[in-house]
Image (cartoon, grey):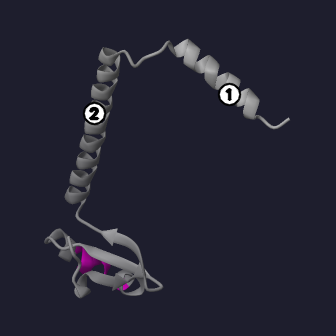
């Protein structure tokens, strides 16, 4: 979503106009609050925030499923090794690189 100039509000104005800005946000707009001329926080509808959080969780789940798929493909292709051996190799490498 792009912001119109009227959606960018300095923090000093937002303090005095919070109720008005909240009504505008509830009606569908989003507000970008600035501090010292820089983006600071956004004012968005709570339902939209919940939606964004659901999207984020969904994306994480899709990434995990993709990792599972890659892991299963590695197993099928024989690209695996014993976890104990891998951990032992990591420990040996850490000891070699540790400062003496």
How far apart are labels 2 and 1 at the CA level?
30 Å
In the image, residue 42 above or below residue 6: above
Viewer-closest of 46 and 71: 71
Mark 2 burial class by Cα count in 10 Å: few <14, some 14-19, many 20+? few
Circle 2: element type: helix
Q: Which residue is mark 1?
A: 93
User: What x and y, as percent, mark residue 77?
Assistant: 32, 18
Mark positioned earlier in the residue sequence (2 or 1): 2
User: Around disc 1, counting alpha carbons within 10 Å, would you say few (fewer than 14), some (14 to 19), or many (20 or more)?
Assistant: few
Does the segment drawn in magenta span residue 18?
Answer: yes
Residue 61: which disc? none
Can you tell which quarter of the image residue 33 is in?
A: bottom left
The image position of residue 10, as x and y in percent, is: 38, 85
Q: Residue at x 43, y 86 (%)?
A: 37
Q: Nearer the viewer, residue 31 or 91?
A: 91
Question: For the magenta stretch, what is the residue range?
Answer: 16-22
Q: Is residue 10 left or right of residue 63?
A: right
Query: Above or below — where is 7 with respect to 47?
Result: below
Give the vertical position of 48 relative to 72 (above or below): below
Q: From the image, tell me which residue sits under label 2.
A: 66
What's the magenta bit mostly, secondary-structure-wise?
A: helix
Q: Secondary structure at mark 1?
A: helix
Residue extending furthest right?
Answer: 100
Residue 32 position, x and y percent, is 32, 76
């Amino acid at each position: 979503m792009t912001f119109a100039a009227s959606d960018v509000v300095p923090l000093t104005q937002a303090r005095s106009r919070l109720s008005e800005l909240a009504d505008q946000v509830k009606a569908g707009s989003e507000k970008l609050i600035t501090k010292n001329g820089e983006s600071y926080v956004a004012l968005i509808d709570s339902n939209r925030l919940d939606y964004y959080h659901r999207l984020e969780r969904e994306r994480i789940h899709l990434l995990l499923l993709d990792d599972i798929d890659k892991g299963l493909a590695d197993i099928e292709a024989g690209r695996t090794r014993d976890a104990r051996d891998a951990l032992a190799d990591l420990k040996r490498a850490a000891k070699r690189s540790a400062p003496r």
